[in-house]
Amino acid sequence: MMDLNFLRRNYLRFLRREDDDEESENESPDDEVFEADDQYYDNQKKNLQNEKIAADISYLTNSSSRNQTVYDMIRQREYQRGMSPFSSFDKRKILQNCLPNTPKTLHKFSHNIYCGKFSTDGDLFMSACQDGTITLYDSRKWEILKEIYADDIGWSIIDTDYSPDQKHVAYSTWSDSIHLYSTDPQSQTHHVLNLQADVYRFCVFSLQFAANSAEIVAGTNDRCIYIYDLNTDRRTLKFSAHDADINTVGFAEETSQLLFSGSDDNTGKVWDRRAFKKTTHQGESRIEPVAYLLGHFNGLTHVSSRKDGCYLITNSKDHSIKLWDLRKTSPAPTSSNIMNDRRIFREFNSRLTRRRNIDKLVLKTDSSVMTYKGHTVDKTLVRSYFSPRETTGQKYIYTGCYHGKIYIYDVLTGEIVACLPGHRGVVRDVSWHPYRAEIVSSSWDQCLRSWTYFQQDKRART
């Protein structure tokens, strides 16, 4: 536990005063926010090389032909291996150098696209629009397999997910229920999962299936996390988790014991179901998180797991993505309502409006291991993810952007390795095919686009 009054002494003084600002005689010298220099970021990159994730990426992308060109690799395969297939390492090396860069419009809808996601095996793709239409594609031919006209739509479909067995899709909206549909084109099976909310205007901003397809976790605008058991067809858990809307929830690993959540209260939290200890506060069940993710200056829009039980990334309205090691998280704040004070939002947004430099502002309590900046998050809950393990060794992080672009960052260096402009509206969701060098972007310009690799022949242009 922290032994300083984090709120009073430090948190509200995060903006560095300009030369013409009046200096305060009472300002604490140990301000919790500082403006980082280049050495700070160099040290962050250097330290990341010693992290487990660096070793994992190095292992997954290591290859006996690491220093060879693709041409040399093919020639070696032909003359020394007798046309034997490439190893998984060699395939990753080739595909890492073939990042998607060329767009193709798959579908033009009549409403904004909120969600788009490949299935686990990559054979299906699901898109969801503001008008309540969910479209399932055969991603091998990009043919429409099924269109679902969702019920109980309030404003828009907000989030979607596949069951791991790929037999069902779930969606959420401004409603106290999650809806479940079959992926079978011949089936019209529809189940309503009532969360039994206690508020009148209720929205599930985020949902995700457990790895065994038996449960769904949901984050909502009443600041609670819900778990629904599909076997017993009832809500089995509800607990207060944050001090503002919960924008994102999910499972951190395959056992479904570790949960994560991100909220408009600027914080991310990690919950271990094996360590749940309930307390009662004003008649409400309270469960304490096992880890805090403190470091963002604004609300979190998305949290994504590497599915190894160690690493998460968070996307935020402060226009940054942060990488977290769950073994090195922030200490718990001393005040339960530390993030309630809206002065943080006013001052941060004021600095944005005045175009003052915010790129190097860092909280001293920030325990993230790397920060990625370049994209813009605004108007909606923009998502970010790790790139696929099978084709890239999870070497990259990719995200949508308010300005209609896709950004791809190198996990270990933080550098932008690709910026793909091609939309006229917010790119809210992006999905990288698990086995192909293909990204599909879902945008508020109502276009669904596929990005694949194409290398222009420089000799043809000379």
Image (cartoon, grey):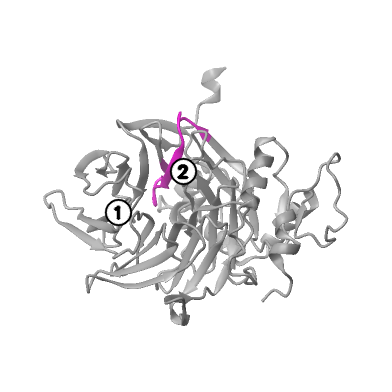
Residue topped by disc 1: 175
Taking depth in this image into account, of 152 and 231 the one nearest to the observer is 152
Q: Quadrant of the C terminus?
A: top right
| Residue 157: percent from left, percent from top | 32, 46
Extreme left residue here?
Answer: 186
Q: Amino acid at mark 1?
A: Ser
Looking at the image, the residue that sits furthest to the front is: 282
Q: Among all residues in the image, which is located at the extreme top?
A: 462
Q: CA distance from mark 2 to mark 1?
A: 18 Å
Classify residue 353 as left or right of residue 93: right
Q: Residue at x 62, y 55 (%)?
A: 296
Left or right of residue 336: residue 218 = left
Of the residues under marks 2 and 1, which one precedes in the sequence?
1
Where 284 sits versus 439, above or below? Answer: below
Circle 1 Cα neighbour tier, 10 Å, few/some/many (<14 / 14–19 / ≥20): some
Label 2 sits on residue = 380
- Who's the residue at 63% across and 43% down the image? 349
Mark 2, secondary structure of its residue: loop
Residue 395 visible? The answer is no
Image location (x, y in percent) of residue 101? 48, 35
In percent of width and height, residue 193 lies at: 24, 62
**Based on the displayed image, in which of its 4 quarters is residue 354 positioned?**
top right
Report the front residue among 411 and 71.
411
Q: Which residues are magenta?
A: 420-440
Q: Residues within 10 Å of mark 2 (few under 14, many from 20)?
A: some
The answer to if 24 sits in the magenta stretch is: no
Residue 429: quadrant of the picture: top left
What kind of residue is marked 2? Thr
